[in-house]
Image (cartoon, rainbow, N blue to C red):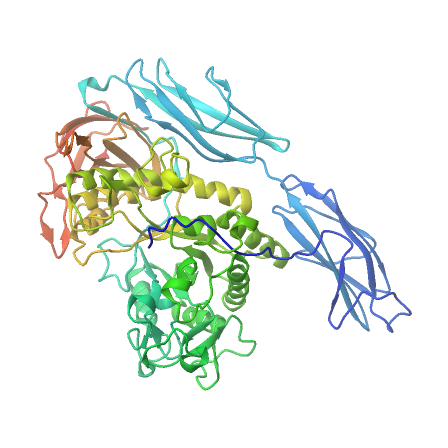
Amino acid sequence: MSNSRELTAMGMALALAACGGIASGGGGGGGSPDGGEGSQKPAISSFTASPTTVAPGSASTLSWAVSGATSLSIDPGVGTVTGTSKSVSPTTTTTYTLTAGNGAGNATAKATVTVAAVPSILSFTSSPSVVVPGGSSTLSWTVSGATTLSIDQGVGAVAGTSKSVSPGSTTTYTLSAGNAYGTTTATTTVTVSAGGGADVTVAVDTGSNVRAISPFVYGYNGATAAESPPGTTWLRLGGNRWTAYNWETNYSNAGSDYLYENDTYMGSPSDGPGDAAVPSVADAKANGLGLCVTIPIQGWVAKDASGPVSLTSTLTDHFLQTVAKKGAPFSNPPVTTDAYVYQDEFAWFLSTHWSGAALPLHLMLDNEPDLWSATHAEIQRAQLTYAALLSQSIASSGAIKDAVPSALVFGPVSYGWAGYVNLQGAPDSAQLGDFLNYYLSQMGQASATQGRRLLDVLDLHFYSEATGCGTRVTVDNNSDCVVAARVQAPRSLWDPTYVETSWITQDSTNNAAIALIPRMLGKIAANYPGTLLSVSEYNHGGGDHISGAVAQADTLGIFGREGMYAGSYWPLLSNNAWGAGAWLCYRNYDGAGTSFGDTSVAAGTSDIAHLSAFASVDQASPDRVVVVLVHRPTLNGSSLDLNSRTVSVQVTHGKALTKARSWQLTSASPVQNGVATPQRLPDATVAGNQITLTLPALSVTTLELTP
């Protein structure tokens, strides 16, 4: 974590082969003019694609001129070819490699077919999504690749990223984004309701905005289920200690966290290889949890437990090189007498322990590389460049995929905003621009060249930089001003109408909303489509206070609704009872194993500043509708407005819902086994799929409606 405002950068572009006519030697050289079959390698005088840009699934013709070849093949996915051309229909941008061979060797050349997709609509929202008659709502969108934008219902052509509307009745708006390759549409509904006199109206529609919730959004940075909040679904093994972790012997280095010390904090040689991970693998498998393990890729890992290490000592005195690919058969136990520690062998070792698990193995490319030169100055002696990190990432991911093809790879595990923008002041940011755009595009190009995906999940860390009265919300401070800012802070994950008070909005976004998830999905769509999104460390503060539970419950709902692949909370305080309590509002809210559904559906609120609403159904029980209501106060002058509010929940569903059960987490809830626990409320009356509740300020309410 850092409050740094440094926004400079460094790096260099990965050189890629040009699209046509550039031959390179392979299998012992190539490309010289043919002087007789078998005596000289073949020559490729041209290899081109026409057209070079196609719509998804459309055809391009690969053509070549070759002399002296006895065999021709094209990768990926084409195989042996004859003649002088071949039609291909790639679904994603693909670099094809033509290999021409004879008895003297091979020559190769490359041609790229760019797949220009129809536009992507990453988000289309209305805020508020419920209005009183005569009220207005802001329609906001995040779109990639569009040349035209329009909204129906009388709005017409639009530009920019938002438009205000004032519907006379409940209206569903359709956004159409078009380009030369087609049109994409998305809808959002603005509900017009008087609310029956309630302070806030919530409109739930189980047939709208239907999206599966990833099972990994309820994650925690903990080693075992017992160390994590009840209901945790995903464990992540990461943090600063992992960058210099030697899995063969378990030695590690504390970095700047403690004297740059080599020690046995993560285990000793006698514990057996990979002991920092093996117990967690077993625990996750036994409890049916997802698991993510960090693979050190920085280049050096601890080779002893010698204590504090001088930042100017010779690296080989206390460290061993970690190499992406072993290039030899793996062994268990690993060989510890050579001078190297192999990343692919660690991945393979983990996969042997994970074997039999129903869930995929998640492997992370180190931890917060943007901060290596500070947190691990004992091994990162110079500031990291874009190019260096990219090269390491491509090599490590490729080696991991060779060893464990089914593993999902996460990267770059960036620490925070300045890391996203310029790798925390990398020297060549001015040359190469936005770091995440660069990283995604270059990983995408490398994947196309290799014919396989090298990055499965874009992974970031996000510790809120929002402040209340000048104090950051993540510090140990529960004053009214900080609490008011903390409970609003999760809106920066998604809300295009919310601008937090922070150095990010003041210095980097030109006082515009952060809207982190749609912002990052936009980068993915533009640079490496199909990549998933994860936030493997985050916190909004207040783990020991009801405001921390409110912020965390809001975050868990946002992650599920917005389509995140994974998320894992990092506890900042030893007392995390209230932060942990948020899990119970979604996971085992009744104490009998009942949870929020696995499918998110539309839930709009007429007062987003005071109330968030999240709704779900479940594939196994489609008529069980669960709604989580997060009630947060704002400031009234310099004090929190702690007034209760009446909330009318109106549900559109295919069946009449007649039964209601509810549980509520407030500051008065008991702490049981170190976790703040929601309490059952009296059953309420449901009439016409509508129910009215009174919610205290700073509360999280789970409402279950059934026929």
Please state the horizontal and vertical placement of residue 123, each as a whole percent of the image: 44, 34
Decide if residue 284 is on the left or right side of residue 179.
Answer: left
Instruction: Classify the position of the C terminus by image quarter.
Output: top left
Residue 689, image quadrant: top left
Decide if residue 622 is on the left or right side of residue 318.
Answer: left
**Position of 399 relative to 459 (above/below):** below
**Position of 559 relative to 2 (above/below):** above
Residue at x 54% of width, y 64% of height: 398
Instruction: Classify the position of the N terminus by image quarter.
Output: bottom left
Please state the horizontal and vertical placement of residue 5, each as a whole percent of the image: 38, 48
Query: Would residue 437 be visible to someone looking at this image?
Result: yes
Front residue of 704 and 242: 242
Front residue of 315 and 248: 315
Front residue of 389 and 45: 389
Residue 71, image quadrant: bottom right
Q: Residue furthest front?
A: 312
Residue at x 85% of width, y 71% of height: 40
Please state the horizontal and vertical placement of residue 637, each as a whole percent of the image: 16, 29
**Position of 563 relative to 272 (above/below):** above
Decide if residue 21 is on the left or right side of residue 54.
Answer: right
Query: Would residue 702 be visible to someone looking at this image?
Result: no
Front residue of 212 and 640: 640
